[in-house]
Image (cartoon, grey):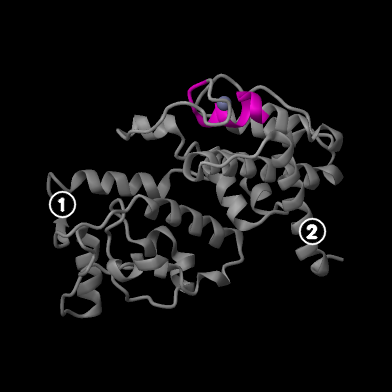
Amino acid sequence: MNIHHGQDELELFRACTTVALGDGEKTSFWHDKWLQGCSPKSIAPELFQLAWRKNETVAQGMTDGRWKRGLQRLHTTEQINHYVKLWDMLRTVQLSDQQDDIIWRFTANGTYSSTSAYRIQFTGTFADHDWQRLWKSKTENKCKFFSWLILQNKLWTADRIINNGGHTNATCPLCRNAAETSQHMMVQCPYSVQVWRSFSPIGLTTHQPATSQQNGLKEWWTAMIGQHQPQRSSTIDQAVIYIAWNIWKERCRRVFDNKELDVNQLVASIKQDIANWHMTHNICEE
Ligand SMILES: [Zn+2]
């Protein structure tokens, strides 16, 4: 917020307030508590260190993804975790044409903010899966982020859009024969089953997910990558990620571009992705 005080007062002010975001013109992107009751600086301290413009407003930061400037230098797992967490939280942010407003935290109204801030800062989002293994996989960052999202059940599939009050075609665009959920798209869909089976020659075997909607995909994913000897596992991890990524891309191609690839074409495109990865990375390997 644009308030002319000393640094200590400003910190105290920020500790006592949250921001109800409007147009984002008055709110400090990194310092103010505008994102689900927290400041991006506290959500992602590692990124704050790297960011080029530490004093930009939310309006500036959210224009063309400018908040990411300087973050291409991220390389530790911690930095990547923070990036993914912040990126996911920012995706749902909508600026309005109202002015930003300050909410004093220690009022009846403010209670919710501090509860949600607590929840965001202290729940172990990353403790329930072998995320290290995902971050270390031989795949591009966008595919790692995608895998992280789908394992958290955070992809915007039709069921999730509809549950959040949106309108969309509920039918799976891959088989046009079932309701679209993340689990259906990845595991049960006959189209995807054929794609997965095409990779049995490299040792990939398919599994059925556990029944729980919440953890089913994680368990299924872990079963697929977990059964291999260490020397085989990086190939399998890589294949699983690129197959899942391409199934999602095919789904989006059909929904947004009105184009489609058949199973053989998609399998060829997955193999090409994997070959490209090796072509661009072999130089750096021993
Ligand atoms: Zn389907």
- Residue drawn at x 57%, y 68% is 74
Which image quarter: residue 169? top left
- State which quarter of the image contains the C terminus: bottom right
> Residue 140 location, x and y as percent?
65, 57
Q: How many marks?
A: 2
Instruction: Indicate yes or no whether the magenta region holds residue 116.
Output: no
Q: Which mark is residue 278?
A: 2
237 vs 200: above or below: below
Q: Main secondary structure of the magenta part?
A: helix
Cβ–Cβ under 8 Å for marks 2 and 1: no
* Quarter location, residue 223: top right
Residue 184 appears in the rendering: yes
- Which residue corresponds to mark 1? 106
Q: Is residue 28 left or right of residue 5?
A: right
Up/down of 262 relative to 187, above or below: below
Residue behind label 2 places its C-beta within 8 angstroms of ligand 1: no
Query: Taking the image as drawn, is residue 130 in sight?
Result: no
Mark 2 / mark 1, whichever is N-terminal: 1
Residue 199 drawn above or below residue 71: above
Residue visible at 44% across and 78% down?
52
Looking at the picture, how far across and down is residue 59, in whole percent?
28, 67
User: Residue at (61%, 25%) from the top-left corner?
Assistant: 189
Read off the magenta span: 178-192
Amino acid under disc 1: Phe
Q: Secondary structure at mark 1?
A: loop
Ligand 1 lies in quarter:
top right
- The circle drawn on residue 283 is none
Mark 2, residues whose alpha carbon is within 10 Å: few (<14), some, or many (≥20)? Answer: some
Q: Is residue 173 left or right of residue 19?
A: right
Residue 189 on the magenta span: yes
The local crowd at label 1, few if under 14, some if 14 to 19, many if 20 or more residues have their Cα within 10 Å, is few
